[in-house]
Structures are given as structure tokens and as C-alpha cells.
Amino acid sequence: MRFILLDRIVAIEKGRGGSFLKNVARSEDFFADHFPESPIMPGVLLLEGFVQASQLLLGCTHGFSCYPELRQVFRVAFKHYVVPGDQLRIDLKIAAEDRERATVRAEARVNDRTVAEATLAFAFVQGERDEEANAHCRRLKSLCDDLSSDPVGRAWESLADRF
């Protein structure tokens, strides 16, 4: 992934849903071209944030044994601009799921305003049967660990060892 469009996992309820945060900074690479005088987060990157959050939710739900591969996006609506300084909250709900696929409803909000919505369909690629999927599963697990960890707590723990 060139852009990781999530900064924090707020909550994951396996098999049900999750909440994620993205702090939108002026220093993001994509603002250089979109648009320099009036920066707006591209809608396709909002959609990519939905995909990344959904993959984390579904991966966690299945113990990172399969890779949720995006198959279809439908019912997409972009309702308001997302600009530097905004904190984007992505909320997900698993709408349907079986052994081979899942459908996720995603909503992005800034403050109390819905800025985007979409429904995404994923197919599960089993990690033990496919080496590429297995590599994706490992990266997804690592990203999940990074985004759900407490950096301040980790810093204190590392300092405690020194005293």
C-alpha cells in the first residue's frame, strides 16, 4: 500500500463492525495535486479508506487466516468535502457474511456530518492455499497490531525498563 489511510483502530467487534480514525493533515501527498489552492481529499481515497478498514475488520474476524479481497463497490455516495484538519471517523457494519464472502456497509463522518457512504463486497482468499494471500494476511495482521496499539503506553513501558 502506498497510502495507509487509517491512523487508529477505535474498536473492532468481530463479526459485527468496527470504528477507525484518520486525521487528515495538510502534509498528505495527495493534497499537492488535489487541489493546491483548495485542498480536498479525493473521493477515491475515502473509498480506499473504507476498503482498508473493511479488510482489517474482516481479517480480524477470521483470525487473519484469509485475505478479504475487494470484489464489488456499490451504493457509493460522496456528500461533503474532507479537508485538511478534519478527523475522519469510519464506521463499518458487516451486513452479510458466509464462508466465502462478506458485504460491509461503510460510513465516513467528520464531526456529526456524514461525508461518504458505500457498500463493499469482499471474497475470502484462504491464506493456507495461496502464498500471495498468506503474505497479505501477515501484512494485514501487522497493520492491525500497529493501529490498535497504544503508542503512549508502549513508550512508558520502554522507559520503565530503563529505571
Image (spheres, grey):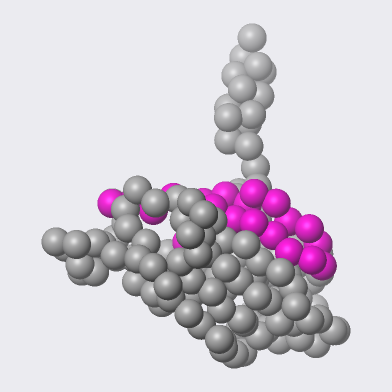
Q: In the image, is residue 159 above or below residue 127?
A: above
| Residue 124 placement (x, y as % from top left) | 74, 83
| Residue 150 placement (x, y as % from top left) | 63, 37
Q: Which residue shows up at 65% across the image and 16% down it?
A: 160
Number of on-image labels: 0
Q: Is residue 127 left or right of residue 43?
A: right
Instruction: Name the outermost residue toward the left.
Output: 37
| Residue 152 placement (x, y as % from top left) | 58, 30
Q: Which residue shows up at 84% across the image and 84% down it?
A: 98
Q: Is residue 84 left or right of residue 56?
A: left
Q: Is residue 22 magenta?
A: yes
| Residue 15 placement (x, y as % from top left) | 82, 67
Q: Which residue shows up at 48% across the image and 51% down it?
A: 111
Q: Which residue shows up at 67% across the image and 84% down it?
A: 122
**Pick the front one: 162 or 109:** 109
Q: In the image, is residue 163 above or below residue 84?
A: above
The residue stretch that appears in magenta: 4-26
Whether residue 102 is visible here, answered yes or no, is yes
